[in-house]
Amino acid sequence: MNKKNILIVNIGTNLGGIESSLSTFCKTLNVLGFSKPTLATWKSEGAMMSQISPFIRQFIKLGVGSLNSILKQKWRFNSILQYIEFKIRQLLKKDEWKACDALSESYDIAICYCQNGYSPYYVIDKVKAAKKILWYHHGSYEKQGRAKQKDLAYYLKYDTIVTVSEANRAMLLSHFPELSNKIIVIKNIIDKEDIVKKSQKTSEDLKVLGVCNIITVGRISPEKGQTFALKVARELKNRRFGFHWIFVGDGPDKIQCLSLIEEYNIESSCSFIGAKSNPYPFINQADMYVQTSSIEADPITIAEAKVLRKPIIASDIPAIREALGNGQFGTLCALNPQTFADRIIDTFNNKNEQATASTSFYDSTTDNAQQLVLIHNLLNQ
């Protein structure tokens, strides 16, 4: 066994694409023979923790805690001072993580597993490690001015920055050309056997007979495009096409989406069923998987739909184009409601021909083997 002492820092363990990737990554470290890592997060244990916990050594909650929890402590004076400092820094938007305690243990490798929140800065300022790695999972970069300059200063302090697709790497380099010698690509590991096994577990039956059953999985947010998807649904209804569209996930756009369903009069055809720790039975029941994102880094749900051999219709953006092999494993579509509707209807009407045509020669094990070598080499350098 490789006894490197590894720390992984993430925002939390709630349901989401990064958290799903984190779960598989922790399992991958075990498969590669590394000692179980320590996981530190800013949020309390979430729904994904049950899947992650068998593959970690210990869990650490970061941050200063709530005032209520501090007041219950026996020795609390220093904690109250720390809480006040944190709140002042938060109010001034001034390096809040610097008010948090540093981790006492030293690590061989510290991995910041997401680019969001305090994590990229905390790992540099508050963690002792011989090697520090940043995993970048987002498909865009929006910061400007001082915020961007701060990110550059911190990113340069990492030994390696891992992006999850070639498109993701190109995007990040377009904003930070100074990082060209630090960025590598390691795609997300897809656990084919686990996906297939979970897809066969009993679940509520959401399949509607006699119509096209569509599924979309993801955080309900602007970049994932569920509001756009509802425009596609309205177009399908206007063409008198029979369909039932299931949306799995939660997020900030959910209230708006529910309002649009009512406005477009498509309540009987669209359902938002919330986040699911196991979405695979729902994908398995569908006639096709549709993704309407405008931003992606490495679309894990598309990879999962490929494993389950579902016809895929998705927006033609760089990361999805890469994931679908330039259309080899699915249909790429311009972000236009009429065009999406055309492709959905065409795919359903030819479903006997297309059920396996776009995915039958995709095998995640080939991709996984390449990524396992890259991870092994990165952590042993």
Image: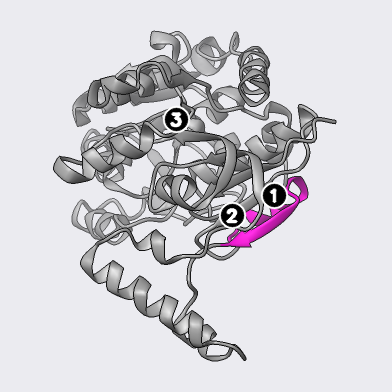
Q: Residue at x 63, y 13 (%)?
A: 370
The part of the image, by quadrant, that contains residue 212 is top left
- From the viewer's perspective, is 226 left or right of 28? left
Q: Residue at x 71, y 33 (%)?
A: 29
* Amino acid type of the residue tagged 1 in the rendering: Gln
Q: What residue did someone put label 2 on?
A: 40
Q: Is residue 356 above or below residue 96?
A: above
Give the x, y percent position of residue 312: 45, 23
Image marks 1 and 2: residues in contact by CB distance under 8 Å: no
Instruction: Using the image, tell me which numbered label, if any, was put on residue 299.
Output: 3
- Residue 177 visible (yes or no): yes
- Residue 208 visible (yes or no): no
Query: If you read the primary sequence from the N terminus, does the residue marked by circle 3 or circle 2 appear first?
Result: 2
Q: What residue did someone put label 1 on?
A: 51
The part of the image, by quadrant, that contains residue 142 is top left
Q: Is residue 143 above or below residue 327?
A: below
Mark 2: few/some/many CA within 10 Å (<14, 14-19, 20+): many
**Which quarter shows the N terminus?**
top right
Q: Which marked residue is nearer to the observer: mark 3 or mark 2?
A: 2
